[in-house]
Amino acid sequence: MKVSSALSLIIALCMWFASPALAAPTSEANSAFETGIEAYRTGDIATAITSWTKASDGGHPMAAFLMGRLYEVGNGVEKSPQQAFHFYEMAADEGNVQAAVKVGFVYRDGNKALDIKKDYGKALSYFEKGALQFWPESQYYLADMYRRGLGVEPSRTEGLRWLILAAKKRYAPAHLELARIYFAGEGVLQDRVTGWSFIDIASRYADADEGKLVNAAIDKYRKRMKPGEMEQAKLVADEWIAEFVKE
């Protein structure tokens, strides 16, 4: 069976952004996870599924996350949103930051297919799990919860704090949201130069999909800029990166 390039990338990211489990997986779980990785890389999806299921039951968060992904896309198993959510929630509860974001979305928005109603308190909790492990996507959505007062008292200050933490980790959506905030003067002094500086920063770190959002922001705010302000904003962006972004 052909190995999914998308899942292969996810495996690589999981290994790179490995997050600690809340409780250490058993040695058997660790061994089963590694067996699954090797099996998947050779195209033996059936063995990978068996091994990762065993590892998930032994408390291995990345194994549970990968099983969730398999069920989400129907790779080697019948596609099942219910099973995908089961494994994602298991992974999130064991400390996987990527799964925590996925589970947070389900509780924030509700999901009829899963028979899950909106629960902002649970959504906030899952976004916090990743945010406290320094995962920028989690910090970005936690910031949104605070700014909109979902499951928590509204707090622009706390929202801005989490947003800046995400921005420092080169997360382009956070830079674009900061740009919007400064152009709108939403809880801060309206400042076109600072706003454009965050668009500039976003353009440097955005991936292909995020690049579309950057272009949309450029189109939206370009006409608001006065002569010389874009050049000034680039200098501000350079200084911000030098101070806050660690390679």
Image (spheres, rainbow, N blue to C red):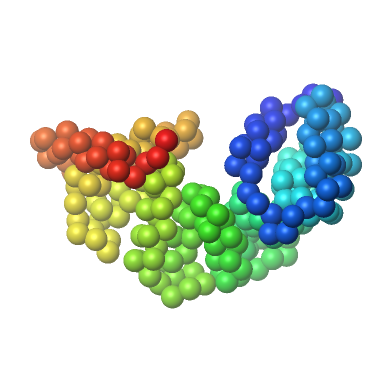
Q: Position of residue 123 (x, y in %)?
A: 58, 64
Residue, far left:
227
Residue, far bottom:
153
Residue lying at 62% horizontally and 55% vertically, measured from the top left: 100
Residue lying at 69% horizontally and 65% vertically, measured from the top left: 116
In the image, taking residue 41 as reference, residue 13 lies left or right, namely left
Q: Quadrant of the C terminus?
A: top left
Q: Is residue 238 visible?
A: yes
In the image, taking residue 215 as reference, residue 67 lies left or right, namely right
Q: Is residue 85 visible?
A: no
Q: Quadrant of the N terminus?
A: top right
Residue lying at 76% horizontally and 41% vertically, measured from the top left: 70
Task: Count numbered badges in the picture.
Answer: 0
Occupied quadrant, residue 107: bottom right
Q: Position of residue 41 (x, y in %)?
A: 78, 27
Give the vertical position of 170 relative to 147 (above or below).
Answer: above
Compare residues 199 and 52 and report the one nearer the observer: 52
Q: Position of residue 212 (x, y in %)?
A: 42, 35
Occupied quadrant, residue 77: top right
